[in-house]
Image (cartoon, rainbow, N blue to C red):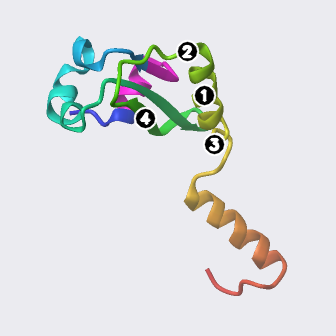
């Protein structure tokens, strides 16, 4: 089974919204195995990208009632995901910090 981030990346979409998750055929297996146990009614998946690569995803869900995800809900979720888009991966960020510290003679070894 593909990881959630891979499934979102393969659709080339930033956000996938399911107002009535129980009735959505494209996630029926995932719903029956996982979401139904948490009593999820509606769910939105949002891709998190670093550069052009989807590195993760997060989800927003409701359990009390079915929710029609509004344009403002989607815009807020995209803004949260976009805030990470241009950040470096943890390994690259550490490498950059080490490089700066070496230049300042604070880091003597790798």
Q: Earlier in the sequence, mark 3 or mark 1?
A: 1
Closest to the camera, between mark 2 and mark 4, is 2
Closest to the camera, between mark 3 and mark 1, is 1
Residue to which mark 3 is pinned: 84
* Residue in the picture at 38% in, 29% down: 62
- Point out the residue furthest to the front here: 64
Q: How far across and how far down the image is residue 36, in percent?
A: 20, 31
The range drawn in magenta is 6-16
Quarter of image, res 58 = top left
Q: Residues within 10 Å of mark 4 (few under 14, many from 20)?
A: few
Q: Are marks 4 and 3 in contact (CB under 8 Å)?
A: no
Closest to the camera, between mark 2 and mark 3, is 2
Viewer-closest of 23 and 108: 23
Residue to which mark 1 is pinned: 78
What's the distance in space between the residues labelled 3 and 1, CA to CA? 10 Å
Residue 78 higher or lower than 84, as above or below:
above
Residue 33 higher or lower than 22, as above or below:
below
What's the distance in space between the residues labelled 1 and 4, CA to CA? 11 Å
What's the distance in space between the residues labelled 2 and 4, CA to CA? 15 Å
Residue 26 among magenta residues: no
Q: Earlier in the sequence, mark 2 or mark 3?
A: 2
Q: How far across and how far down the image is residue 88, in percent?
A: 64, 51
């Amino acid at each position: 089974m593909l990881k959630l981030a891979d499934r979102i990346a393969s659709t080339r979409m930033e956000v996938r919204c399911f107002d009535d998750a129980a009735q959505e055929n494209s996630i029926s297996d995932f719903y029956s195995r996982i979401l139904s146990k948490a009593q999820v009614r509606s769910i939105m998946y949002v891709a998190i990208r670093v550069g052009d690569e989807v590195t993760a995803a997060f989800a927003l869900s409701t359990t009390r009632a079915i929710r029609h995800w509004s344009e403002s809900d989607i815009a807020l979720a995209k803004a949260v995901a976009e805030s990470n888009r241009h950040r470096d991966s943890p390994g690259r960020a550490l490498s950059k910090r080490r490089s700066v510290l070496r230049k300042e003679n604070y880091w003597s070894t790798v």
